Image (spheres, helix red, strand yellow):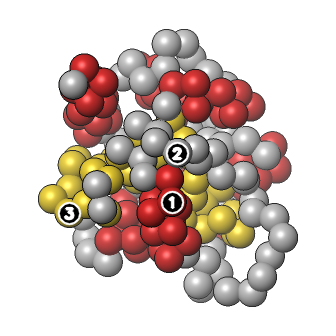
Amino acid sequence: MPDRIDSVLPDLVDPNLLVLFCGSAASTKSAILKAYYAGPGNRFWSTLHEIGLTPCLLRPDMFRELPKYNIGLTDLAKYSSGPDHTLPAGSYNSNLLSQKLNKFAPSILAFNGKTPAQNFLQQKPKYGRQQNRHGDTVIFVLPSTSGAARRYWSIEPWRELAEFVKNLESS
């Protein structure tokens, strides 16, 4: 992958986060607005609030507030944007995500959708907590919150994640 100066959206990764969410790539709308999960049909922000990971409903332009709740954001394709099927070959960078996990060691890596998870794990995953880990990082695969993936939507794996987070916080 050629050297690039700026990613489409900045990483929101700090040491020792509870959850690092990883999507495929910024949507076209997110790239334009420079905010994660900004598409009109995306339910990421409402889901975070509904499952109790944020105490209030945040807007996409408030994404920089997530570290206050021990939550971070990244994408597997940092230098491309748009729907998964339009991304150029080589857009996904699993090595870069591995480096972030090694450096920042979040408790949980939660993939927002099967596509980034499958690319990173090199296998077709099921939703929920995965058997494999990355070092000490537990991995979850969640149904995509994208409006384009609505037919695959279920909040149950997201609730499983929230329960796991609550158990981590209380231990």
Q: Residue at x 22, y 47 (%)?
A: 128
Residue extending farthest left? 131
Q: CA distance from mark 1 to mark 2?
A: 8 Å
**Quadrant in which residue 51 is drawn:** top left
Q: Position of residue 81 (x, y in %)?
A: 69, 63
Of labels 1 and 3, the one closer to you: 1
Q: Secondary structure at mark 3?
A: strand
**According to the image, label 2 marks what residue?**
15
Task: Please say if the residues under marks 1 and 2 sit with CB atoms less than 8 Å apart.
Answer: yes
Looking at the rendering, in which quadrant would you find the N terminus? bottom right
Q: Residue at x 51, y 60 (%)?
A: 103
Q: Position of residue 32 (x, y in %)?
A: 82, 50
**According to the image, label 3 marks what residue?**
132
Q: Residue at x 25, y 71 (%)?
A: 124
The circle drawn on residue 103 is: 1
| Residue 21 is at least partly visible in this image | no
Q: Front-most of 36 and 153?
A: 36
**Quadrant in which residue 154 is drawn:** top left
Crowd rating for badge 2 (residues with CA inside 10 Å; few <14, some 14–19, many 20+): some
Q: Residue at x 46, y 27 (%)?
A: 48
Residue kind at label 2, given as amino acid type: Pro
Which is more N-terminal, label 3 or label 2? 2
Q: Secondary structure at mark 2?
A: loop
Residue kind at label 3, given as amino acid type: Asn
**Quadrant in which residue 76 is drawn:** bottom right
Q: Front-most of 130 and 80?
A: 130
Crowd rating for badge 3 (residues with CA inside 10 Å; few <14, some 14–19, many 20+): few
